[in-house]
Amino acid sequence: MKLVMNDGFYSPEIGYFEVIGGTAFTPPNGTIKTPQKPSPDHVFDGSKWVLAEVVPDQIDAFPDLTARQFAWMLAYTGLGDVWDKVELQLKDDRAQYAAVKSARSAGRFKIGATLEAVKMLKPVAQAVAPDTDLSEGAIRAAWKLALKEAANVT
């Protein structure tokens, strides 16, 4: 079996994303080809990946969501519909499809990892749901709402 590595890209408008290696792809203007992102804790400084200085109140202010809270957030905001459409778009790429499909099975969800996943899938998500706000601010607002409201769901 031949292993295909994804190609990494960084766009000032989209952030970091990957494309399946060897795929014909025309990146948006201003996009830079990069090595794959080493971890969610790295940021692109314009020429290389560097470890980000995490400000505690930025990430720690967002506790993990349980699977139930995350499901509530997806249903309440309509992001679950976007997720379903993204899965359908990726169905021909079994590896990406499996990764996206299985991600909903996690027991807990972290804001940082969720934001990274949204950035990576944003080109596909915007193609299938162009009117959906997938900005970091919208995701953080939905996260806060899930923390507050899902606790009241019995």
Image (cartoon, grey):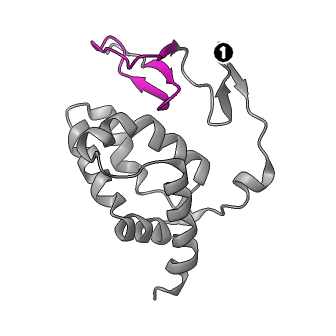
Q: Position of residue 1 (x, y in %)?
A: 31, 16
- Side of 26 where 5 appears, left or right: right
Q: Which residue is mark 1?
A: 48
Q: Residues within 10 Å of mark 1 (few under 14, many from 20)?
A: few
Residue closest to the eye, 71 or 34? 34
Q: Position of residue 42 (x, y in %)?
A: 67, 30
Disc 1 secondary structure class: loop
Tell me, yes or no, whether the highlighted magenta stretch contains residue 25: yes
For the residue marked with disc 1, what is the amino acid? Lys
Residue 144's place in the image compared with 89, above or below, is: below
Q: Residue at x 61, y 62 (%)?
A: 64
Q: Residue at x 55, y 15 (%)?
A: 35
Tell me, yes or no, whether the highlighted magenta stretch contains residue 29: yes
Q: Position of residue 121 (x, y in %)?
A: 39, 38
Q: Which residues are magenta?
A: 7-33
Q: Position of residue 25 (x, y in %)?
A: 30, 15
